[in-house]
Image (spheres, coloured by chain):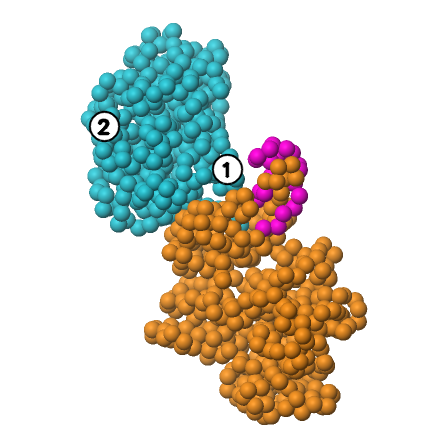
Amino acid sequence: MSGISAYGAYVPYTRLPFATISGRTAKEGGPEKAVAYYDEDAVTMGVAAATDCLKGIDRASVDAVVFASTSYAYREKQGAALIAKALDLRRDVSTSDVSGSLRAGTNALRGAFDSVAAGSARRVLVIASDCRMGAPRGALETKLGDGAAAFLISDSDPIATLEGSHSVTDEIQDVWRVDGDAYTHTWEDRFVVTEGYAPVVSEAVQGLLDKLNLSPSDVNRAVLYAPDARSHATASRTLGFSADQLQDALFGKLGNTGCAFAPMLLVASLESAKPGERILLAGYGDGADVLSLTTTEHLEKLDARLAVSGHLARRKPLRSYETYLRSRGLDPKEWQKGGGGGLSATIRFRERDADIAFKGGKCTSCGQVHFPVPRVCYQCFSRDQWEPYGLSDKRGRLLAHTFDYFFPAPEPPAIMIMAEIEGCHVQIQLADAAPEDAILDMEVEFAFRKIHEAGGKPNYFWKAIPVSN
Amino acid sequence: MSKTIRDKVAIVGVGACKFGENWDKSREDMIVDAAYEAYADAGIDDPQRQIEAVFCGSVYPNGGTGEVAEALKLFDRPISKLANYCETGTDTFRYGVMSIAAGMYDTVLVVGFDKPKDRGVSGPSVDFDRVRGLPATPAGWFSLCAARYFETYDAGREDLAKIAVKNHHNGTLAPKSMLKREISVDDVLNARIISWPFGLYDCAAQSDGAAAVVLSRADLAKDYENDPVMVKAVTIAVSANPQTDPNFDFLAWKPTHFAAKDAYAQAGISEPFRQIDVAQVHDCFTLTELLTYEDLGFCKKGEAKDHVASGTFELSGDLPVNTDGGLKTFGHPTGATGVRMIYENTLQLRGKAGDRQVKNASMALSHNIGGPPQACGIAIIGHP
């Protein structure tokens, strides 16, 4: 039987309080949205959510990766393959991207359930990640947010089994973005809701309830995508769900994270669910996907993870709207970003184990760990006695730091540290931290981040971040 | 360990152009100014006949050996060029010294030069062709020892500031320095931060410059204009990169330890603080000079700040360091710096250093450290 065997999520540490947009002082607990910082994008958030999801799980057991995003940087070059490398998954993992619709997240989930049910894969990692751009000071700006969710769909030990699913496809131009558009467009909002979202989601939910011979009261938790808080409440009421059945859509905390939105809300729902509950998930975009899941006793055995609630709890509000614009690359610059030829593709190819997978080596003669892997060992001078040694899931200790005020960053300084990881010394930036957070000998963990956009494309490496618990 | 080269090679002429933002001077201009001053200092009136080989040092991209040959019109003889981080000048000098000690030439010219100010940036540029190790600026590299050193030895930015104040003062007394302005400790502490703990005044400036030395066989040195100064030791040492060295302790720079051990053995020095009378050390950043006092054995580990407070390394102190204002006031045209230090030490040993003259100097040391940093060059020169 196919089901969800693990979940994870990622919400960026950075938030934009709505008060800050209009230059007012943000009040504690006031409305805000999650913002991918300048070193984050759909891929880095996807890696973070997948890492959260795979906590305590043997990565070699993953057979396939499906990456859903409408905001992934490349038109030609796969995101799932890059993420599989960053996660250090098997060489024979099957990868695919799903894109083009706000429904891509639930599309990917449906496909993964189908392939596990069909027996073509035993464990499929589904990642939905979006970084949504509303025009500065436009109506969408406060509605849209950034984040990612990840699920492991498996043929055994499910925490939630798939009871059934139903889809409706609907051709409508309510929300769109064409090649070259920096920002999402929508038609006027009453049309979007009254002709698009509300009737289509209702039709799809009703379709699944009929199919499964259920009534709304049989559902313990209704997890509904919605463009905004008002339409969310209206749709729920129309469908016959009471307020205590409805999963909080986190408006004013997270924002609408596009194709990751419904999946992230599902994670939030699973975080507080008990075994034996029925969860109904509805994703919307050019139609709707609805899935019914039933939680099992395995739910309570899942290792602790940050998921949505843990990530929401760690937050740093931006101090000014200018900082928001700089962190999004929306500020005017003397020089356009991403000039020059960028990284050499051949060097990047040779160094992908180090730069993308953050793999060092362990000397089989003396046990010294080193990054990057040299030919000759620093300690025992033996040659070519290295076995691969992953560092991304290890913790490190801060040995030294400096604060660089010249490296391009929305809020200088950039913090460079030396981290000690199991005897290996690595020079690396410290992210999600202010200078006063950098303390000698503090513990750090590691996150996949965008380092710069030389050559007009995202160039990734890892950064240290303060340990979050 | 090196075999000793002590007293086999003599410095018979030194020269330097004015260091600074030499907008109106080309590399050719600076090379010619430095070399012809060294010729004149040595009493060389026919370089075409007297200069048998040239060793030049420069790290920024330029025209290669042909550029120096063309500038000086020295053709039909060997010219080599090398780059070895910030100790390029010292290493170039080393090659010149070795060539004479090997008996290949009687007289050679060593010229170090660089012109970073033609690049349109005020500091080193950030390298975006990689993803690791960023931000990659020398200030960031050389600050790596700061946090742990400060914590271990109860030191801080104010201790570093006094070094910048000293060097700025000395620079006002050196005719060829770029910066001639006294500063205060408060100026240093209140300046904008470049890369913590370094504020603007903790950093050496970038400048253009060239310096030259004429070397001769020791036994022929008396034929030249001035009293010769003898080479006592010259060496280079490379350590593991402190950014990846699993054994690095973030309290001291290893290459200086390595090079000092070798240089002191060559020169027969067992008590550096007592036996060395004047030193030019690499003050690319104030912390570099502070650590170098300890790394060269001028004082015990952790005691540098006490000597800074008591003035040990000031012009009037027991061991004056960076008598001409150092990289702080000359800037750091990389290939020129080590040769510029030999120039200053030679003037000090001859008693020709003007208002910054150190009394009774008979043994002088110069030191550069460069790279991430992982390489050090040391030259010791003195009276015969």
Q: Which mark is residue A234?
A: none
Residue A226, placed above or below residue B51: below
Q: Which chain is orange?
A: A
Q: In the rendered structure, the residue with mark 2 lies on which chain?
A: B
Disc 1 packing (10 Å; few <14; some 14–19; many ≥20): few
Q: What residue lies at 34% left-to-right and 73% top-to-bottom? A: A25
CA neighbours of label 2 inside 10 A, class few (<14), some (14 to 19), many (20+): few
Magenta residues? A369-391
**Residue at the image position 47 percent from the left and 15 percent from the top:** B3
Tell me where residue A348 appears, x and y as whole percent: 61, 48
Q: Is A88 covered by the magenta stretch?
A: no
- Locate residue B236, reporting x and y percent: 46, 25
* Residue B353 falls in image quadrant: top left
- Identify the residue under disc 1: B247
Is residue B93 in sight in this rendering?
A: no
For chain B, what colour was chosen? cyan
Q: Position of residue A318 (x, y in %)?
A: 40, 67
Q: Amino acid at mark 2?
A: Gly
Between B100 and A166, which is closer to the camera in this rendering? A166
Structural distance between the alpha carbons of marks 2 and 1: 35 Å
Q: Which residue is mark 2?
A: B317
Q: Is residue A112 above or below residue B161?
A: below
Q: Is residue B253 above or below residue A429?
A: above
Residue found at x 51% / y 35%: B240
